Each structure stands twice: as structure tokens, then as C-alpha cells.
Image (cartoon, grey):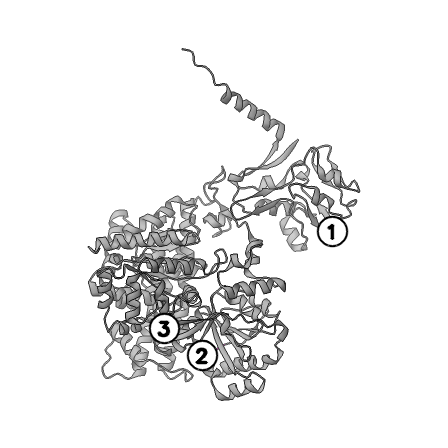
Amino acid sequence: MRIILARREYCLTCHQCALACSVNHTSSKDILEALSSQERAAARIFIISNEHQSGVVTCRHCLGAPCLKACPTQAIERDAFTGAVTIKEELCIGCRDCLLACPFGAITLEKGKAVKCDLCQGHPACVEACPTGALRFVDVEEESQSRRQKALTKLFPLRRKR
Amino acid sequence: MKRPQELSIDPAAQQQIHLARERKLPLIWDRLESQKPQCGFGSLGLCCRHCVMGPCRIDPVGHGPQKGVCGATADTLVARHIDRMIAAGAAAHSDHGRRPALLLKEIAQGVNQDYQIKDEAKLRAVAERLGIQTEGKDIPALALEVAEIALKDFGKQDASPLQFLKAYAPRRRLELWQRKEKELFEKTGASMGIIPRNIDREVVDIMHRTTMGMDHDPLSLLVQGARCALADGWGGSLIATEIQDILFGTPFPREIYANLGVLKEKAVNIVVHGHEPILSEMIVHVALQEDLQTLAKEKGAAEGINVVGLCCTGNEILMRQGVPVAGNELHSELVLTTGVVEAMVVDVQCIYPSLPQLAKCFHTKFISTSDQARFPGGVHIQFFEEKAEEIARKIVKLAIDNFLQRDPKKVHIPQEKEKARVGFSVEALLEILGGSVKPLIDALAHGQIKGIAGIVGCNNPKVRQDFFLVNLCRELLQRNILVVGTGCWAIAAAKHGLMKPEAAEIAAPGVREVCRTLNIPPALHMGSCVDCSRILVFLSAVADHLDCDIADLPVAGSAPEWTTEKAVSIGTYFVASGVPVHLWPEPPVLGSPAVTRLLTQGLKGLLGGWFFVEEDPQKAAQTIEKIILERRKRLGLA
């Protein structure tokens, strides 16, 4: 399955990803519509900083998702198609156990319910919006395989024929 | 969340920040946190919104676009952006300067009866400097001529240099600018002007030049930036300073108190905030009127009316009237949290729009007065120069009436206040030196003083308040470099005791002795931010005395906590006048290595000054010392 990865060295913290995320989680998915109807949606991607560094944090859609295990109402489930860990709004009671369970702080609250990255049904708006390519939508296993290939050439360089 | 001690080195500020947090009052530092991390494109100057083919961004790190829709490169974007910052800054200072010029004309014509010309000697001196025949002319006639020359500098359409610049800039500098204009033409085949023609025109030129499809060459963009900045320093700001001196008196040394401790629990406190002295002078004047003082006492304010300043309006009236100053820019919210401000009266510039909202958490009336600066949520009392006294009385009465609304439970005035000796106009310095700059030049020549540094500019919540302003000053004094300055630096230095004559103790022996002999503090308050022109005029006097250029003198400048576009204009006119300038935080130019190189190296060969960026006060002081020592060596001094 594919997840959103951020390359910190490319990120200029322009907030374009968060804006696109918010817009894509309004009912119209259109910025002008959202502005005129004053509908607001929380961004599910977080641009954060401290004294020395800044970066992007969003859900890893963990294979052993602690949020999913923590949810007492089974509101959190795994999407069969995208593999995303998603929250069923109608089942969420706002107990916030998932917020505490997530080691990345990737879940937030909106109107008393937990909300999180849902991978936009397999087409993440944040990745599309990123102007520098800092965000990528990557299949981790494929990525790992390609790194293995790269490692091969590094670990075992070709012997030149004498 | 950062502790108050990490946000400001000022104990009064720390107390009030702590208090505001306890009461859940949002302050500027909280809003800065909520903006973090700030957009990298904006910070690097790589975002362009000049037309609606955009907005465009250029990707400095990734594989994104390297050109805007129109084809503009990072170099163009950054140079255009810095030009517009200069234009905005020059516009602000110069539009300020226009007001006193117009007022002087109205007084001369007898249209305005509320103001008088307080300093006739200065009027004569300015007139003579401008080449006006003064003999046999009365004061109104001279005032009219000076005002008209000033107003002409805003509006004349020929390409001749500004009259004020021609009259005040040192000979060698004028020659250098003319020579460099020729050289630029010979080198590039394009006409590039350095000497400003008309204050307003240079701002308009930048707005025209930076619109879509105009100037894309970083060099000619920056040369026009320099010209516009010079129109501010040797034009708009200089006119503001000189005519304000004529109207309200040239500053001479006097003692004041600085910091929040100047507020009085048993008085009606009026804080005047902003930049101009025209209204605030009148408020100071009417607040002393007996009937209003009595009225205040009748309302229970045993100590009457207490007018205090803030920011550059504060600087204007402390220099001329000895009015105490409550603080610099980052104190503007904190002063309200004391709960004893009956009215905050503002004119123009550097007034946070958060203030009226914060005022509502107390009984404080926030009163705006300028048609150019309106604040939703505040009270607006329109100021007209021709009805100045009437309006000022109305404002003071409103403050007096508000005294009874004060909630004693919300009162907290920090005890901190520090004595400061201020008021060092060029005229005052010359008088102290015995009528000529020669004693100072001797002290420089003998190495008693290594050099002179000017520290100016704002507070910025990104920098721990006053930390850089004060520590850079200390570091320089310890290196035997005399410090002069204006604006929010000057208030910081006053608050932290650097403007007491006793502060000479912390300076190295040379500066210490000079200060003791002349009975001056080692950090000299030269006024508000338009009064940076006083520094230029002083440098001009020294350069002309030695028949050299400002770029030959062992001097440097710094704006170590800068915030505004005005600071970019000030920095640029010092650089364009031959003074190297330190900046912190870094300006939004790093997105273009070519423009950054021009600003930090290229300008040196062209104008004699350049910019450098440094985050650490000690290292900044080291670099300034190095520059000064190099210049001394070039002059053949040890």
C-alpha cells in the first residue's frame, strides 16, 4: 500500500499541503465554494516546527495501527481498497483515545470527533499540491525494494576486468 | 511555550507577559507562534503576486518551476520584491515628512494659528543651507521659502537632484554618485540613476518598474532601489527632521525616564503612540493646561494628567519636551496590560491592529486620529492641523472622563524605569564639541575612539526583545566604538541604562574618557526613525570637514531587530551613502544567490556600503570592528 512520505530537505513550510487537505475535506472540495459557504475543515496534515527544525507530520497508516486497536466503538477501520486507516464519523464518540494512542500525533479533533488522513481515496490532495515535490505518495515496499537494488550496487561494486 | 524571560530581556516586559498569560490575553508572541513555521517561499523572496497570471513561486530546492508564468527568474522576483519594500518604506517616511512641510507653509501663510515656529534660529540655518537669501527677510517669508523648496522636492518634474540632498550631502559623495551614474552607463549601455529627482517620483518609479513586463535586471532594479532610499534619507526623512525642529524646537540634552514604570497609578495616563509629533506635541501642550489638570484631579486623579510616549512619537516628544517614554514597539501591547492607561492615542505607523481589541479587555480607550490609519474596534477622533488644540483637548477630556472606569483589580504597574540623557541633535553635538566636529575627528585620529556605529530600527518578536539591540551596543562600546542611534534601539538603550552618563563605565577606556570629558552617555539618542537623517547630516559634517567621502570614515550601521519596510529603506540609504549595514533577521532575498551577492558584495564597489547578516551580537560587533579597523587603515590611522 502507498502512504505519504515527506522529504524534509525539500519542504519550505509553505502550508500549501494543509490548505489543499482542508479544501478536499469540505463537502464541495472547492476553495471558493468553501469560502462562500464558510464551511471549514481541519487539515489532516501538520506543518510543525521548533527552534531548530521544521517538518510535516501525517498518518503512516500503520499496519498495526494503535488507534484502530484503541477505538472502543470500532469507528476506526482499514479501507480495503487503499489500505488507509480511516474513521467512521457516525461511530466516533469523541473519546480521544485514538489521539493518545497515535505515536505521531497525527489525529486531531473536529466538531468533537476525531479526524485523520484518509489518503483522499487514493489521490492525496496534499501530494498533488506540494510545489517542491517534498511530499510523495509511495508504496513503502516498492520503495524498500528499490533501495535494496541501490544498496546492491553500493555493497557489491562491479569488479573491473583487468 | 516560551518563558517570558526567553521573549524579552526587559524585566518589566517579563512581568506583563506573565500577567497577560495568567489572564489569557493574547499577545504578539502568541500570534507569531501560531504562524510558525512561516512560508519558505515568502521568507526567501520567491513568491510573486504582481499579476494574476500568478501567484507564482520558484522552487529553490526541488524540481519545481524555475520561472514564473511570465518567465521571471528568482533573481528578478527577489530584486523586485526588495525594491517594493524600499518603496513602501520610503513612502512612509516621506509622507510623514510632507505633513510638517505643509504645516510650515500654512503657518507662514497665516492659515494655521494653532502652531507657531518655535525655533527661528533653526529656520534661518536651514534656509541658509538651502541657499536662500536670508538677509532682511522676516520669519514667515523664510518659512514659506523653506516649505516651498521642501514641497518642490516632492513634486518637481525635472531630473535635477533633490534640493535638500544637494544642500546636505557631502561634496565627495555627490561627486561619487554622479561618477557612478556615468560608469554604469558606460559599462551597461543603459541609463541608471542614483541621485533622486523627486521624492514621490522615485517611489512611483519603483511601482512602475516592478509591475509585470518591466525591469527584470537585478542590477538596475537595485540601483533604483538605492535612488528611492536616498530620496527618503536625504529627502523625506531629512525634511521631516529639519522642519519638525523648526516647528517644535531643535532637541538639546535633557533627562527623561524610560520604561513602564513611568505610568502613574494616581494620574490620568495618556499614551501617545505612532510616529509624528504634530498631534502629540499638542496633547503634551494641552495636558499642562490648568483647567484640564484641575478636571483630572476632580475626578480623583491626585497627580493630574501623565502623558507618556511610545515608539517614535515617544522619541519625538522625549527629545524636545522631555516627556517620559513607556517603551518601544514590543511594549505597545504590554503598556495596555498595566490597566492604568486611560487613553492610547495613535497617529501613523507601527501600530498593531491588535491594540483596540486588547484595549477592550481593560477600560482603555484606543483612539485613532489619522485618515490614513484606521483601526476597527477603536474610537476615531479625526485630527485636523487647523483645529489641533480643540481636538487635542477633546481627546484629553475623553481620557480624563475615562479615569473613573478604571478597574483597580486589573492594575499592575511594573516598578522598572531608568534615567536617560537624551536629545543629541547634530546642533547639540556640535555645541558639546565646541562648535566644530574637529575634537571628535581628533579623538578618532588619535585612536581614542576607534569608530562610530549607528544602531537603529525596530523590535521584532522573532528576536528576544532588546537582547540584540542592547548587547550589540555593549559589545561595541567595549571595543571602543561610540554608539549613536534612533528609534526602538534608542528606547531600548534608555530602558537598559545605557544612556546614563555613568554607563560610560562599561565602555573601553577611550570612549569612557571622551564621554566623561564631554559629560555624555556612551550611547547617544539622536531621535526617532526619521531622525536617522541626523546621523546622515552628522556624517556629512565629518566628511566635509576632512574633505573625504562617507565611505572613507570608520563607521558602520546595524538594524539588529528590524521589522518594517521602513527599515529596509533606512538600511539601503545608509548603504547607498557609503555605510556598511548589519541586519538581523535576514531579509527575504536568499532565494536569489545573485541578488544576495549584489547586496553583500557587489554594492561595495558601486556605493561603498553593503549589507551583512549575523545572528549573534558578539560576532556582529566583531565584524563591525573589523570594518572600522580596515577603514582606519585605509585612512592611515593606527
Q: Judge whether A156 appears above or below A97 on screen.
A: above
Amino acid type at image mark 2: Glu
> Between marks 2 and 1, how big is the CA–CA gap?
55 Å
Q: Is residue B218 visible?
A: yes
Foreground pick, B225 / B584: B584
Mark 1 neighbour density, 10 Å: few (under 14) some (14–19) many (20 or more): few
Choose the circle earlier in sequence order: 3 or 2: 2
Looking at the image, residue B408 lies above or below residue A144: below
Chain under callout 2: B
Residue contact at pointers 3 and 2, CB within 8 angstroms:
no
Q: Nearest to the eye among marks 2 and 1: give it.
A: 1
Residue B272 appears at what percent x and percent y? 49, 73
Residue that numbered label 1 is attached to = A112
| Residue under numbered circle 3 | B423
- The residue drawn where x is 49% and y is 74% is B262
| Circle on res. B385 | 2
Please give the chain letter of the residue carrying mark 1.
A
Q: Main secondary structure of the magenta part?
A: helix
Mark 3: amino acid = Gly
| Secondary structure of the residue carrying numbered label 3 | loop
Q: Which residues are magenta?
A: B383-387
Tell me what residue is drawn at x 64 percent, y 32 percent.
A2
- Give the SS element for disc 2: helix
Would residue B314 be counted in the magenta stretch? Answer: no
Circles 3 and 2 on the same chain: yes
Q: Quadrant of residue B226?
A: bottom left
**Disc 3/disc 2 C-alpha distance (Å):** 25 Å
Classify B158 as above or below A101: below
Q: Are marks 3 and 1 in contact (CB under 8 Å)?
A: no
